[in-house]
Image (cartoon, rainbow, N blue to C red):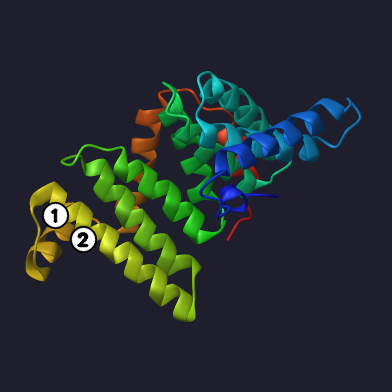
Amino acid sequence: MQTPADFDVTMPDNSREFLEAELKKRQEQLLALTLESDPLTRASLQFDTAEIMIELAKPGMPEAAWGLAKEAMLIFIEHKQWEDAIRASDALYRTELPASVVALGNGLWLSITYPVDTELSILMLNNLIQDTPDKSDGAAVAAAVAHYLADLRLEGEKRDSVMFLTASMLSKVAERHSNVNDQGKMNFWMDKLELNDPSVFLPRMGQVLDAIVNGQWWYDRDALRAELPVN
């Protein structure tokens, strides 16, 4: 499936013309689908179309992109395509429409619950950090979860490089949250907010997600949890 990077074409003079041509092509492909067409093919086309609309940012396009990306996300969830569902939720978030934070929360739950691409999970957590007031503990919890996921899911040099990134995220959040500017203060801040203990900060992450979604979950979390393998 294509991602936003697929549309990152170095065409400074006519990039909009290129995107508009791509949009027309995707719309024609969508119109050619039938009721018998593969749902994942439809969802992929809808996602691609939404991404181009968000990039073009013409009047009315964010709203159109929202409808396409949300339907795509629900199809991906139905077919257990978790990474694609998370990418669709990120597209919904980037429409900057009133419900974009709800979309972010829905995508974040999936990105933490399932062992998807760690960098995708970190991207989603960073979205939350950027959308959270400086003094909010929610950003600190999100940064701690990002660091934890990198440690849990990755190995070798990849783990080291990504954990360097997440450690930097934590440091920046600590600085804006409590003016933390040295290691001693960092250790105190981490202990004070209990950011070294996943048994504490993971449930707090759940509380943050519940707060931003405010009951507008687009899937049955209990049913999805019940399907998870038992460790």
Q: Is residue 221 left or right of residue 98?
A: right
- Label 2, residues with CA under 10 Å away: few <14, some 14-19, many ≥20: many
| Label 1: how many Cα within 10 Å (few below 14, some 14–19, many 20+) | some
The residue shown at (31%, 54%) is: 143
Q: Are marks 1 and 2 in contact (CB under 8 Å)?
A: yes
Q: Secondary structure at mark 1?
A: helix
Q: Real-space Cα distance between discs 1 and 2?
A: 6 Å
As drawn, 82 above or below 98: below
Q: Determine the residue positioned at 57% across, 27% down.
A: 218
Point out the image quarter for the C terminus. bottom right
Nearer to the camera, 75 or 44: 44
Residue located beneath label 1 in the image: 175
User: In the displayed structure, does residue 65 sit left or right of residue 23?
Assistant: left
In the rendered view, tell whether residue 208 sits above or below residue 11.
Answer: above
Q: Residue 196: percent from the left, percent from the top?
A: 26, 61
Compared to 198, does 103 lie above or below? above
- Nearer-the-camera pick, 113 or 79: 79
Q: Quadrant of residue 97?
A: top left
The amino acid pointed to by label 1 is Glu
Q: Residue furthest front?
A: 13
Helix, strand, or loop for circle 2?
helix
The type of residue carrying mark 2 is Ser
Residue that lies at the very extreme toward the right in this rendered image:
36
Q: Position of residue 20 (x, y in %)?
A: 64, 34
Q: What residue appears at the point 55 percent right and 59 percent down from the top-left corner?
A: 117
> Residue 211 at what x, y percent from top left?
35, 29
Q: Is residue 123 visible?
A: yes
**Looking at the image, can residue 194 be seen?**
no
- Residue 134 is situated, as x and y percent measured from the top left of the image, at 18, 41
Taking depth in this image into account, of 16 and 65 the one nearest to the observer is 16
Q: Which mark is residue 171?
A: 2
Image point (15%, 41%), residue name = 135
